[in-house]
Amino acid sequence: MLRNIKLIISYDGSNYFGWQKQNKLPTIQEEIEKALYNITGENIDLIGSGRTDTNVHALAQVANFQTTSKIPAGRIKCAINANLSTDIRILSSEEVDLDFNSRFSAKRKTYLYQIYNDRVSSPFYEKYSYHIPYRLDINIMREALIKLEGEHDFKAFMSSNSSVKSTVRTIYDTAINSENKLIKIEITGNGFLYNMVRIIVGTIIEIGNGKKDITCIEKAIQTGQRTYLGQTAKPQGLFLKEVVY
């Protein structure tokens, strides 16, 4: 009997070339599919809620796969973990309806971005944040993030080598908080364009240090021109935090 298994996955993306399988390059999807083959003997196609790029991490990526294996759903996580490197962990495994698709059933996603804001970088955050050595104005950065909330055409906030049917997305909520030297930015939306979060972060960093005026956000949305925005922030500060269904 065919079964559909939902996984929640946490991973450190530092040693991988993103989520999606690539020829001769280590990826998260491929590592988990190899572990599943060892367990079930089946060539399984693992569906992720979305792709993460090279050096991007996940606190709670969601994926699903179909199988005829009779292993109890709750035990699948332990079996997979036993066949994985410790920088990838399956947090939970459960059986779901056959029509559940981790990508197309998703209602909203939250991304977290970390900035280490100090004159000297930290060896403990080197792989998990973007080091910015100059002062940032958190208040103006918060104002800039709020301007992104709502439904907008985010064409300007997309890498040039991507193609999608629509560039309209809805940002439900944004937040920015500073604790000691670590600045944490969270963005929740119904979907994100390729590199959208990193372009947003790169832009508000430049707003925070005075290189760009806050009006660049509205101009970019109105015109769709990428040139109004800042540089794309580095990947290692980005985490997929949560997917809601």
Image (tube, rainbow, N blue to C red):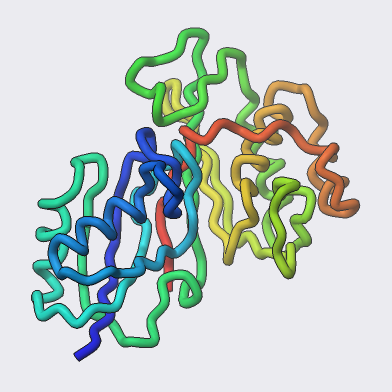
**Which percent across, then down, holds residue 38?**
15, 60
Residue visible at 75% across and 56% down?
A: 154
Residue 222 vertical position relative to residue 245 in the rendered view, above or below: above
The residue lying furthest to the top in this view is 120
Residue 226 or residue 187, whichever sits in front: 226
- In which quadrant is the N terminus drawn? bottom left
The residue at the point 20 percent across, 68 percent down is 93
Q: Is residue 77 left or right of residue 87?
A: left
> Which residue reaches farthest right?
223
Residue 78: quarter of image: bottom left
Q: Is residue 240 visible?
A: no
Between 96 and 47, the residue placed more toward the observer is 47
Which quadrant is home to the C terminus? bottom left
202 w.r.t. 123: above or below:
below
Give percent across and percent down for residue 50.
48, 60
Return the residue nearer the eye: 62 or 219: 62
Horizontal and vertical percent for residue 114?
A: 47, 34
Query: How many numbered marks have been drawn onto this rendered protein structure?
Result: 0
User: Could you tell whether 198 is left or right of 58 in the image?
Assistant: right
Q: Residue 127, can we see it?
A: yes
Q: Taking 21 as reference, is 171 left or right?
A: right
Report which quarter residue 15 is drawn in.
top left
Q: Compared with residue 196, is residue 141 higher up or lower down, i.e. above or below?
A: above
Reply above or below: 82 against 129.
below
- Residue at 35 percent across and 16 percent down: it is 123
Outermost residue toward the front?
A: 24
- Is 228 displayed left or right of 164 in the figure? right
Residue in the image at 78% along x and 61% along y? 153
